[in-house]
Image: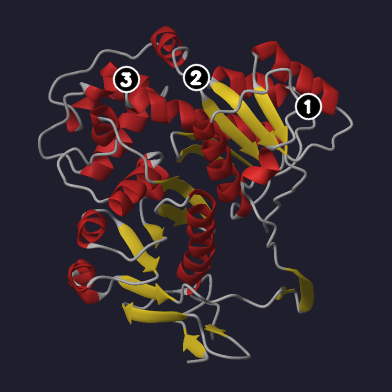
Amino acid sequence: MKEIQLKYGCNPNQLPARIYVENGELPVEVLSGRPGYINFLDALNGWQLVRDLKAATGLPAATSFKHVSPAGAAVYAEMSELEKKACFVDDVELSPLAVAYARARGADRMSSYGDFISLSDVCDEQTARLIFREVSDGVIAPGYTDEALAILREKRKGAYSIIRVDPDYEPELTERKQVFGVTFEQRRNDAPLNAGVLKNIVTVNRELPPEAARDLLVSLIALKYTQSNSVCYAHNGMAIGIGAGQQSRIHCTRLAGTKADNWWLRQSPQVMELPFLPDLKRPDRDNAIDLYIGADYMDVLADGAWQNLFSVRPPVFTAEEKAEYLATKTGVALGSDAFFPFSDNIDRAHRSGVSYVAQPGGSIRDQLVIDACDRYGMVMAFTGVRLFHH
């Protein structure tokens, strides 16, 4: 098959719409549902991300995509009982691939609401059951077991989008796109991201444990498919905060850092012990947690809306309590898709427990950034590879 007709493009007024290839066959097959234009953008970018993660780490990988940037990405790693509870998966049995998706979605569950899922391996029954109970638009994977396919075909009464991708497909080296009738052409970004890009360590501290190297690769590979400017915080094999599409790099660092902080705060005793109403659904719990962690909780208290979320009124989670809890978190890895122009990015990263940094280098202020890392005892590698994605 050379083309697939789509319901519409990015918006309903953009008709007609299709995806197609000029030579050969499309590398994707729709097994169920009717994926749209944005679905396919998310699916094809997400598939590349998890394929790269699997190649770099050898581990099952998953990503949760929204509007052509990952909301989360992760490889398989053991989950603590606390992490399982924070990701709302402490009640199910998980295969390694299901763990990867639970972690990819769990880091930023609000952003992942209505996501498009990409899986590096054949989707198994446990992963399908996890997907079935979450709100998402569809999934792409190199294959599905019979049990998994039967489960997913029941989602949305058969309208759920299920795509199978050819794992052996390699696109042409040259890629093109049109903007305002003008065709842009460039070499596809096939720069390999592996342990080799982390060898140029420029800080006094040069101790980069294997787990930290893995986390830096997770962050860099996630950034390769994130709308730029972008910064990614990662820990224990998962992206815990992604700042995408900001015009200023410090705003990327702040946005991603806030998301990383929220991931840690989700695991705090104050959040783990929240007295949710017994019939409150998972998406509503996500919203309640976000309100509770943020300053908006004071408004919730003031107007009495807490009664729609909690069985009893939870105490305020003070700024001092949050800071004290976050101060215990270290060992976070940080990747940037381009060089840090100022050391303020490192100062902000330090507040979110960053111990390891990877960035291309090449700024006229590189030494100031290195000095800032040395001040905090961080390890920083210059990769020499810029990862802009537009």
User: Nearest the camera: 219 or 207?
Assistant: 207
- Which residue is located at x 39 percent, y 9 percent? 321
Residue at the extreme left of the image, as rendered: 278
State the CA–CA distance, disc 2 to disc 1.
22 Å
**Quadrant in which the C terminus is drawn:** bottom right
| Disc marking residue 268 | 3
x and y percentages locating residue 166 in the rendered image: 46, 77
Q: Are marks 2 and 3 in contact (CB under 8 Å)?
A: no
- Which residue is located at x 47 percent, y 86 percent? 4
Q: Are marks 3 and 1 in contact (CB under 8 Å)?
A: no
Residue, disc 1: 342
Residue, disc 2: 330
Q: Is residue 66 above or below residue 322?
A: below
x and y percentages locating residue 334 in the rendered image: 59, 33
Residue type at the position of mark 1 = Phe
Secondary structure under tag 3 reads loop
Residue type at the position of mark 2 = Thr
User: Nearest the camera: 195 or 163?
Assistant: 195
Secondary structure under tag 1 reads loop
| Disc marking residue 32 | none
